[in-house]
Amino acid sequence: MIRICSTEDVPKGTVISADVDGTQIALVHGEDGQFYAVYDECSHAAVALSEGEVEGCTLECWLHGSRFDLRTGEPTGLPATEPVPVYPVEVRDGDIYVSLTPSNGVTR
């Protein structure tokens, strides 16, 4: 697990982009209070998901409106049809850690 930042750096309902050993990650503080990490590129249009909107447990791509479930990486709204990698997140002592081994088996 690699430390990304403090939990205070990602307010609820927001997303930040982080470079983790050369992999761009979108780190999301979901509206459910949980932290999620997904590959920071839409599987449809190759744009940064970290620039999108958080809604519940989904992240919406700003360009064409594709939505991704933050828990599974599965698209929940077209035009995307392919899932994005989801990375395990741990919160320890107020810090957020991410593993670069996708929990959903999807590689980029």
Image: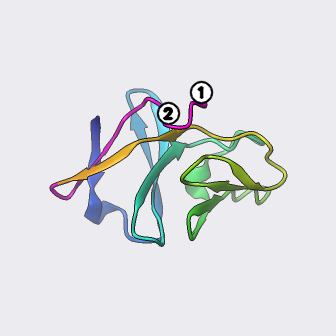
Asked whether 97 or 17 is in front, the reply is 97
Task: Name the kind of residue labelled 1 in the image.
Answer: Thr
Magenta stretch encompasses residue 13: no
* Percent of width and height locating residue 1: 29, 34
Q: Alpha-carbon distance for marks 2 and 1?
A: 7 Å
Looking at marks 2 and 1 on the same chain, the residue that comes earlier in the sequence is marked by 2
Residue at disc 1, secondary structure: loop
Image-based side of 96 in relation to 49, left or right: left
Tell which residue pokes out farthest to the left in this image.
93
Colour mode of the rendering: rainbow
> Dot 2, how many residues are within 10 Å of its Cα: few (below 14), some (14-19), or many (20+)?
some
Circles 2 and 1: CB atoms closer than 8 Å: yes
For the record, the magenta segment spans 93-108
- Residue at figure coordinates x 71%, y 39% from the top left: 46
- Residue at figure coordinates x 44%, y 27% from the top left: 22
- Residue at figure coordinates x 59%, y 57% from the top left: 51
Residue at disc 2, secondary structure: loop
Q: Residue 34 appears in which quarter of the rendering?
A: bottom left
Image-based side of 65 in relation to 7, left or right: right
> Dot 1, how many residues are within 10 Å of its Cα: few (below 14), some (14-19), or many (20+)?
few
* Percent of width and height locating residue 9: 31, 61
Image-based side of 92 in relation to 82, left or right: left
Task: Locate the C terminus by quadrant.
Answer: top right
Task: Name the kind of residue labelled 2 in the image.
Answer: Pro
Residue of label 1: 107
* Percent of width and height locating residue 16: 45, 55
Prevailing secondary structure of the magenta residues: loop
Residue of label 2: 102
